[in-house]
Image (cartoon, grey):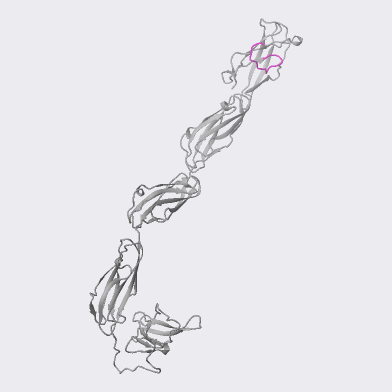
Amino acid sequence: MAFDTFGRFLYEDLKEPSGTSTSVHIFSVATLQETANSPLPSNFPSSGTWIVDPTAPLIYADQVYQVDPQTGIPSPILSTSPLVKPAIFSQPPGSQPVLGPIAQLSATSFSFGSLSLGQTSSAQTLTITSDGGQALSLNTLAITGANPEDFAETDTCHVPNVLQPGNSCYVLVSFTPSAAGNRTAAVTITSNASPSTESAQLNGAGLTPAPALTPIPGSLDFGTTAVGSSTPMNVTVTNAGTAALHITNVAVVGPNTNDFGFSDPACNSAIPVNASCTITVTFTPLAAGLRTASLTLTDDAPGSPQVIAVKGNASAAPAPAVVVNPSSPDFGTTTQGTSTPMNVTVKNTGTAALHLTSVMLGGANGSEFSFSDPGCNLAIPSSGTCTIAMTFTPFSVGAHMASLTLTDDASDSPQSVQVKGNANAAFSAGAAQGGSMTASVSAGQTAQYQMQLTPGLQRERLARVQWRAARRDVPSPCKRVDCEWPPGAVHGNRVNQRWRHAAAFDPDALHSSGWNSRAPPSGACFGFAESCQEPLDIR
């Protein structure tokens, strides 16, 4: 272990990680950190063999070395040492070593980075300190090297000048590249120190003026948007370069191009250095699920085209939905000519208002059903209902079918609802209690018949028709059949057809013509005649 003459550096012999050799490592006494120039070459003499000159920055080993006061690196100045070991330096008590002038530079190099041509950097400071035992005479100070014209300096040294020990002066250096590429130079001083010439290296790079496009944000995530609705987001495009930026094209590409749109009116003209423009991107999903695309910018900046990823999740659009209750209305069995009501409820089970545009009845027996829907003409809110009042009024007996069709803005429109009902006959005819439907009479005589009309389902009254045979000027034995309406029977138009009755053996027959005849067996009358000229209504 050894110290240099001035106590700035500590030299320590340490084994290398391989463990096979030992090198001299240099430590700064001020920071106790190993210096950037440590260790010395492995063939450098061990510090334990040195003789340090207490009067000058010299080390005597296999050669005579001078110690650099800034780096601590010993440099040979004599190939052989004049001292013969063992030898020691002695110094009278209280005396100080006599030191010559020393020029200490605060840094050995400065880097200015990359600048556009003609752009000037901020200044960096080099400090020159007189650090020896005698005054430092600064003779010259200049920018030297390959590209001195790209660097400029101002200083407080005012060469030629003399700095007394401990004093300093300052050099401020700036960089303005005049050409593209790496640019180098040095701040060089000459003095009465040893060595007499010292330099601080300068370097920087020149860039040809060019735009640089910076999009913020670099990607867009629209989150969740309902199908059919829109969500906008902005992209700010900044020109971070050194020349005007020109965007020649903006486009949306990718799997779901039609789900994204953009507007960029301010980006159509030149964008100056450090200026910005805004592109508004709008997400209008056409289908549910994850939707992706890319916004591409084509321009004159390096890296063109720039790509901005865009994405969004689409939820199903609010929509109405129709549920009809009952789903297949059944009026059951009713009586011919009567009316049976039933309410049909239309419910909106969707997430948007429902609008019914029409309600229609159709099908084989559509005319025997009717409806009223005043509450369904307005918008039906989500979870709301309206009522269709239906009526079944059968004109004939048997099963009846129809279709109720709803046209609306639900996805499954039109909805078709099957409607059905069954009708019994209004009444049935037969012989009255204790009576008969047959009789034998001679020509010119009168026969009387008592009949009973029985109402169909839900009828409450009976009517009897008394038939009387009367002579008519037609070939015997056929007679005209007339009818009389007993009390309780009412004439009207509820049954919309003419009743035609047959005498004798076919009393329930209905005919559209007044007279029919055929040869009567055994003299019995088979004449058929119209019984009355008005429709029959039984209440």
In x, y percent, where is residue 197? 30, 78
Q: Is residue 509 shown in magenta? A: yes
In x, y percent, where is residue 135? 25, 83
Residue 304 against residue 14 in the figure, above or below: above
Residue 286 against residue 302 in the figure, above or below: above
Q: Which residues are magenta?
A: 502-515
Q: Quadrant of the N terminus?
A: bottom left
Count of numbered circles on the image: 0
Q: Which residue is at the front of the view, 365 or 273?
A: 273
Q: Quadrant of residue 435?
A: top right
Which residue is the extreme one toward the right?
Answer: 522
Q: Is residue 78 left or right of residue 16?
A: left
Q: Predominant secondary structure in magenta?
A: loop
Residue 141 against residue 287 in the figure, above or below: below
Q: Quadrant of residue 56?
A: bottom left
Q: Which residue is at the front of the view, 141 or 277?
A: 141
Q: Is residue 227 left or right of residue 151?
A: right
**Can I make out residue 122 in this image?**
no
Residue 9 against residue 284 in the figure, above or below: below
Q: Quadrant of the C terminus?
A: top right
Q: Which residue is at the front of the view, 283 or 195?
A: 195
Which residue is the extreme one toward the front?
Answer: 79
Q: Which residue is at the front of the view, 344 or 27?
A: 27
In x, y percent, where is residue 87? 38, 94
Q: Quadrant of residue 330?
A: top right
**Can I make out residue 14 in this image?**
yes
In x, y percent, where is residue 124? 30, 70
Q: Is residue 505 shown in magenta? A: yes
